[in-house]
Image: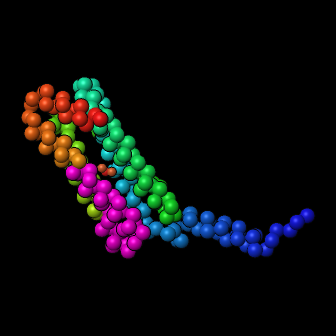
Amino acid sequence: MAQPRPGRAAGVGARQERERGRCAPEVAMIGARMQEALNRHVQAEVFSSYLYLAMSAWCEAKAWKGFARWLRVQGDEELAHAKKSLDFLLTRGGEAKLGPIEAPPSSWASVLDLFEKVLEHERKVTAFVNDLSVTAQQEKDRAAEVFLHWFVSEQVEEEARVTEIVDRIRLVGDRPGAVLYLDKEYGK
Ligand code: FEO
């Protein structure tokens, strides 16, 4: 019977040691504070997704089909952001400790009110992402700092996109025909 080659056996052993090390807190590659912050980030992004899903459902029920579609797509993006952050945490040997997701509101006064709330929410997410970056700096976690650059840039784009919608809805005021035109535009 063929004997295992010593080099290969040593390689497997080393890999098993490394895999064991991933689970051991004393050798985790990512610090506890950064892990906790990233877990909260995942929670925040999932809540964003949940909020936009609720907003999309409200728009759908009010026959704002275009805005409903825009919000559904946005909600999917937020869930992708949550997974991106979770994957980074896991790749670094961190532990997923996901928190509860609170229920979002179920109704809004108007389409303008709804998008003002989206903007308000995105500003909170921006502040959260900025705080995460500060945590990464304080922890001297360079990998997390670089990883978070993407989220910082993404928030600039998201705030700009939502600000444009809010500005345009404010511009047309309460003329239903004009708001319907915007609804059609954003549903494309
Ligand atoms: Fe992924 Fe809009 O925060």
> Which residue does the image show at 13% across and 27% down from the upper left?
176
Query: Which image quarter: residue 56?
Result: top left
Left/right placement of residue 171 relative to residue 145 reads: left
> Which residue does the image show at 39% across and 63% down from the upper left?
147
In which quadrant is the C terminus drawn? top left
- Residue 150 or residue 113, whichever sits in front: 150
Residue 51 visible in this rendered orientation of the protein: yes
From the viewer's perspective, is residue 31 above or below residue 123?
below
Query: Which image quarter: residue 136?
Result: bottom left
Left/right placement of residue 130 relative to residue 43 reads: left
Q: Residue 90, how many percent across, how many down?
A: 50, 59
Residue 95 visible in this rendered orientation of the protein: no
Instruction: Look at the image and give the residue range highlighted in magenta.
Output: 132-160
Question: Within the magenta stretch, is there residue 136?
Answer: yes
Question: Within the magenta stretch, is there residue 165?
Answer: no
Magenta: main secondary structure: helix
Q: Residue 175, how many percent across, how many down?
A: 9, 29
From the viewer's perspective, is residue 134 above or below residue 83?
below
> Which residue does the image show at 36% across and 62% down from the upper left?
148
Left/right placement of residue 138 relative to residue 26 reads: left
Q: Residue 35, how many percent across, how many down?
A: 42, 62
Left/right placement of residue 92 relative to residue 81 reads: right
